[in-house]
Image (cartoon, helix red, strand yellow):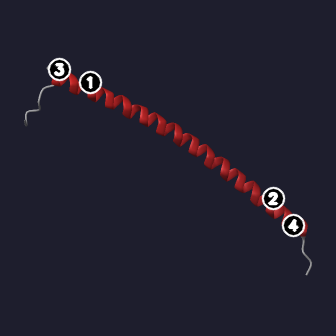
């Protein structure tokens, strides 16, 4: 059986090139998702701080612009 080493080598190199492209694409996506998660976490932290401040103001009786909805 004659093995065409050259064609096998080309096939392996082609597969490696596709895998490298996919790995780079996945890495780019992970980096983008990491940035998005960081932004969402920061937004959540800011919202949490705003809620704490509003609750503290309401507990102190300093919040006049928030009225109870009519169903209370």
Image quarter for residue 17?
Answer: bottom right
Q: Residue at left 90%, top 74%?
A: 3
Residue under label 2: 13
Residue 64 picture location, percent across and down: 15, 19
Looking at the image, is 8 positioned above or below residue 67?
below
Whole-number angstrom distance, CA of label 4 to CA of label 3: 77 Å
Residue under label 4: 7
Whole-number angstrom distance, CA of label 3 to CA of label 2: 68 Å
Locate residue 41 relative to residue 57 in the image: left or right: right
Q: Residue at left 32%, top 27%?
A: 49
Residue under label 1: 53
Looking at the image, is 56 positioned above or below residue 24?
above
Residue 38 picture location, percent across and down: 48, 36
Residue under label 3: 63
Mark earlier in primary sequence (2, 4): 4
Disc 1 secondary structure class: helix
Disc 4 residue crowd, few under 14, some 14–19, many 20+, Cα 10 Å? few
Locate residue 27 relative to residue 9 in the image: left or right: left
């Amino acid at each position: 059986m004659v093995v065409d080493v050259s064609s096998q080598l080309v096939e392996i190199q082609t597969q490696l090139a596709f895998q490298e492209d996919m790995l780079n694409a996945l890495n780019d996506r992970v980096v983008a998702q990491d940035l998005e998660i960081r932004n969402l976490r920061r937004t959540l932290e800011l919202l949490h701080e705003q809620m704490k401040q509003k609750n503290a103001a309401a507990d102190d009786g300093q919040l006049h612009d928030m009225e109870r909805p009519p169903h209370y």
